[in-house]
Amino acid sequence: MSLSPRVDAEAKTCTPSGKIKGKKPPKDQCNKAHDSECCEEGKYYDIYNCSPSVSAQTKAVLTLNGFEKGADGGGPSECDNKYHSDNDPIVALSTGWFNKMKRCFKNITIYGNGRSVTAMVVDECDSTMGCDKPHDYQPPCDNNIVDASVAVWEALGVPKKDQGTMDIYWSDS
């Protein structure tokens, strides 16, 4: 019996492209909503220009984000320089998946908690910068993040108390 080599999209790794050093946020400058982490003084954070390969079932970590003005998402969305309602199923993707705005306003399908939901990409979860005012003094995103509105979490049937991070799969719609 001959075994053919297994092709695995996850085998292609995306390694850090560098590091940034954390700075202590000025008083009340880091928005900690949705359990957001603030940069730690002197800690080094990995940055990524890439993300794992996209497939029909791309593994990712779903995180909770606010896209409204004053929310933990920071400034307006990258795709249109506007704020968006958290009642809409929208997401921000890690830098590599965001692909220099090529996924702006495209839909992705997210699979998690035994359900699926279609969401529109409106923003980048920046994997190349962080720990500064434009990023609400939060660290850079990992390279495998789908940062989602409350509407996405609700469509997946995740109770509010359990919203925060969850392993998921996603694909282009």
Image (tube, rainbow, N blue to C red):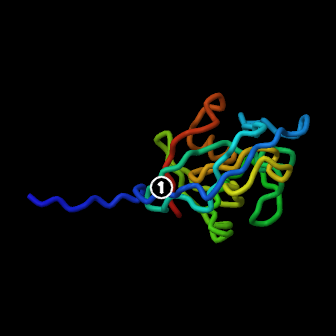
Q: How many numbered badges does the structure rendering display?
A: 1
Q: What element carries label 1?
A: strand
Q: Where is residue 51 in the image (x, y as percent from the top left)?
A: 55, 59
Residue in the foreground of this view, choosing between 101 and 14: 14
Q: Position of residue 155 (x, y in %)?
A: 60, 44
Q: Which residue is drawn at 53% across and 52% down?
A: 110
On screen, residue 9 versus residue 86, left or right, reads left
Residue 47 seen by the camera: yes
Q: Which residue lies furthest to the right in this view?
A: 27
Residue bearing the label numbered 1 = 58
Displayed quadrant of residue 78: bottom right
Q: What residue type is labelled 1?
A: Thr
Q: Where is residue 113 in the image (x, y as percent from the top left)?
A: 50, 39
Residue 173 seen by the camera: no
On screen, residue 97 versus residue 9, left or right, reads right
Q: Which residue is drawn at 67% across and 67% down?
A: 104
Residue in the foreground of this view, choosing between 40 and 7: 40
Residue in the foreground of this view, choosing between 164 and 107: 164
Q: Which residue is drawn at 69% across and 54% down?
A: 125
Q: Quadrant of the N terminus?
A: bottom left
Residue in the foreground of this view, choosing between 58 and 172: 58
Q: Residue furthest left?
A: 1
Q: Position of residue 85 (x, y in %)?
A: 78, 51
Q: Residue furthest top?
A: 161
Q: Which residue is drawn at 85% across and 39% down?
A: 25
Query: Looking at the image, is 41 positioned above or below residue 10?
Result: above
